[in-house]
């Protein structure tokens, strides 16, 4: 599942990378942040780091006494990917499930031409073939929409 996260890290710039010009300083901070971001790779809570999408805030630099390096607190937004599963609820559309037909009844099911049943409570192993992140709108929380695939069908889940 893709997540949009806002993180606060400290970026340390060596004294020789400092320049009085604002743009050069911001560039040095961004380059150092990207280097550290690429080296970090992942955390247990957020998953794998994919990309920094924006640099939201750069705090005031503080000189470190022993080295002369300058520490800048930065706030940035990034995209991460975390393995998902198991998923409790998915939406199955009979229009997207080749070889299956929907059987309406007290306990509706999908029945395949080979008599395989998909019903409430059954466990499926699927492969994620596409993910789209949806922003929150009008008080409704955002989330991820997944495209799923299993033999003979295409499933869509909204989390």
Image (spheres, rainbow, N blue to C red):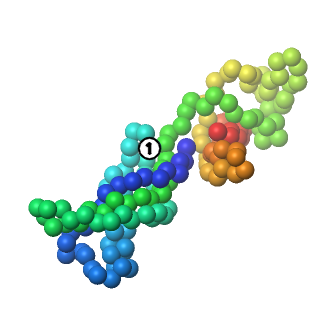
Instruction: Judge whether 44 appears above or below 29 on screen.
Output: above
Q: Residues within 10 Å of mark 1 (few under 14, many from 20)?
A: some
Extreme residue toward the right, this view: 105
Residue at 64% across / 24% down in the picture?
A: 123
Extreme residue toward the top, this view: 106
Circle 1 — which element?
Answer: strand
To which quarter of the image does residue 148 belong?
top right
94, 2: nearer the viewer: 2
Residue at 86% across / 17% down in the picture?
A: 106
Disc count in the image? 1
Q: Quadrant of the N terminus?
A: top right
143, 38: nearer the viewer: 143
- Res 92 seen here: yes
Whole-percent x and y of residue 130? 62, 49
Instruction: Judge whether 137 appears above or below 74 on screen.
Output: above
155 left or right of 54? right
Instruction: Judge whether 52 appears above or below 138 on screen.
Output: below
Residue at the disc numbered 1: 47
To which quarter of the image does residue 107 belong?
top right
């Amino acid at each position: 599942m893709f997540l949009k996260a806002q993180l606060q890290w400290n970026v340390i710039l060596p004294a020789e990378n400092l320049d009085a010009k604002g743009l050069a300083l911001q560039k040095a901070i961004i380059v150092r942040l990207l280097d550290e971001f690429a080296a970090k790779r992942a955390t247990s809570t957020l998953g794998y780091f994919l990309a920094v999408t924006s640099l939201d805030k750069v705090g005031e630099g503080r000189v470190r006494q022993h080295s002369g390096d300058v520490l800048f607190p930065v706030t940035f937004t990034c995209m991460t990917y975390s393995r998902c599963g198991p998923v409790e609820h998915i939406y199955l559309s009979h229009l997207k499930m080749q070889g299956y037909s929907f059987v309406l009844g007290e306990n509706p099911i999908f029945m395949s031409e080979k008599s395989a049943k998909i019903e409430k409570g059954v466990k499926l192993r699927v492969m994620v073939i596409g993910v789209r992140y949806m922003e929150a709108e009008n008080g409704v929380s955002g989330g991820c929409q997944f495209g799923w695939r299993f033999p003979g069908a295409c499933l869509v889940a909204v989390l």
